[in-house]
Image: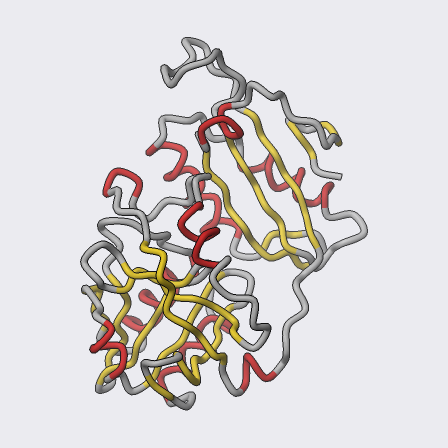
């Protein structure tokens, strides 16, 4: 049972602006023995995203306690924290005295084939375009309809993820992941200035690459550039890292040295 403002409940006020307008943010993270992994990083991202929407961010100690409480019976699951602006009157104007809603829930870790981690995954390009909105770029806001529509494009269980392009035809990332390429010994990830989510694992990889002397580039990535890459992989806080072995109609790859190093950095680093 999720915790809503600290109380075990499955009921949400129908006037909640998160439900009405997607007026809120969220974080998804892994738990071990009821403790959130990479908690400081996830909380820092949550606080940043709340600030973008001018939301009050709850105390980190409170959220950590509620994650532990919600994880009873599921100590190695996936935690989710959602903060909305809370209930409000009809219309888009912000409430004069907002009362934010805090939702903490834990789900079982998803079961996926082990070979997706070792051998790589098959991916597709989606027809749905990613939303272009620089004011919301990088944050985990509650309107994820572009990812919902993109994920609805396939039901083949052999396809692990879909990639979205922006309005210019450049790659943004996956429906649930950040994209990386290896190019001549450098790591490249799409520029997210116009949209997409700047995830914790993306942040970590860019930092670890620099500390290990690996050049990094945050730049527009076209489909042609993706096709010419030496290696391709995806990251997020639940999957860690999936090598990409094939993107339908684009190319075929094998896990290479930078993919292997990146997986090690995520596994062993802070």
Residue, x 25% and y 38% (percent of image)? 135
Q: x and y percent of residue 65 in the render? A: 66, 39
Residue, x 72% and y 42% (percent of image)? 70
Horizontal arrangement in the rendering, residue 86 relative to residue 8 (left or right)? left
Total marks in image: 0
Horizontal arrangement in the rendering, residue 111 relative to residue 122 (left or right)? right
Say if 120 sits above or below 99 in the image: below
Say if 150 sits above or below 214 in the image: above
Residue, x 56% and y 77% (percent of image)? 158
Q: x and y percent of residue 27 in the render? A: 51, 46
**Residue 207's quadrant in the figure?**
bottom left
Residue, x 42% and y 37% (percent of image)? 47
Tell me, yes or no, if residue 209 can be seen here.
yes
Say if 97 sits above or below 110 in the image: above
Which of these two is toward me, 139 or 41?
Answer: 139
Please identify the residue farthest to the right as the structure is shown: 73
Quarter of the image with the N terminus is top right
Horizontal arrangement in the rendering, residue 23 relative to residue 102 (left or right)? left
Q: x and y percent of residue 51 in the render? A: 36, 32
**Residue 64's quadrant in the figure?**
top right
Say if 242 sits above or below 119 in the image: above
Q: x and y percent of residue 225 in the render? A: 21, 77
Which of these two is toward me, 74 or 153?
Answer: 153
Please identify the residue farthest to the top as the structure is shown: 96
Tell me, yes or no, if residue 260 can be seen here.
no
Q: Which colour scheme is used?
A: secondary structure
């Amino acid at each position: 049972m999720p915790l809503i403002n600290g109380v075990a409940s499955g009921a949400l006020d129908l006037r909640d602006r998160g439900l009405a307008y997607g007026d809120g943010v969220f974080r998804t993270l892994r738990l071990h023995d009821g403790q959130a992994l990479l908690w400081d990083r996830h909380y820092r991202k949550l606080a940043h995203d709340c600030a973008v929407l001018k939301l009050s961010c709850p105390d980190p100690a409170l959220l950590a306690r509620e994650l532990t409480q919600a994880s009873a019976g599921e100590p190695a699951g996936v935690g989710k924290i959602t903060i909305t602006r809370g209930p409000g009157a009809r219309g888009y104007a912000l409430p004069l005295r907002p009362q934010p809603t805090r939702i903490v829930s834990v789900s079982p870790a998803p079961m996926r084939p082990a070979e997706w981690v070792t051998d790589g995954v098959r991916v597709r390009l989606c027809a749905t375009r990613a939303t272009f909105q620089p004011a919301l770029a990088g944050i985990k806001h509650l309107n994820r309809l572009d990812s919902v529509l993109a994920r609805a494009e396939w039901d083949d269980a052999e396809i692990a993820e879909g990639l979205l392009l922006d309005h210019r035809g450049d790659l943004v990332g996956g429906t649930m992941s950040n994209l990386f390429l290896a190019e001549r010994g450098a790591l490249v990830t799409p520029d997210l200035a116009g949209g997409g989510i700047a995830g914790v694992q993306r942040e970590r990889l860019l930092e670890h690459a620099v500390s290990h002397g690996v050049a990094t580039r945050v730049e527009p990535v076209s489909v042609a550039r993706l096709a010419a890459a030496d290696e391709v992989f995806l990251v997020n806080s639940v999957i860690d890292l999936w090598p990409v072995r094939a993107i339908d109609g684009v190319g075929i790859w094998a896990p290479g040295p930078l993919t292997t190093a990146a997986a090690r950095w995520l596994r062993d680093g802070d």
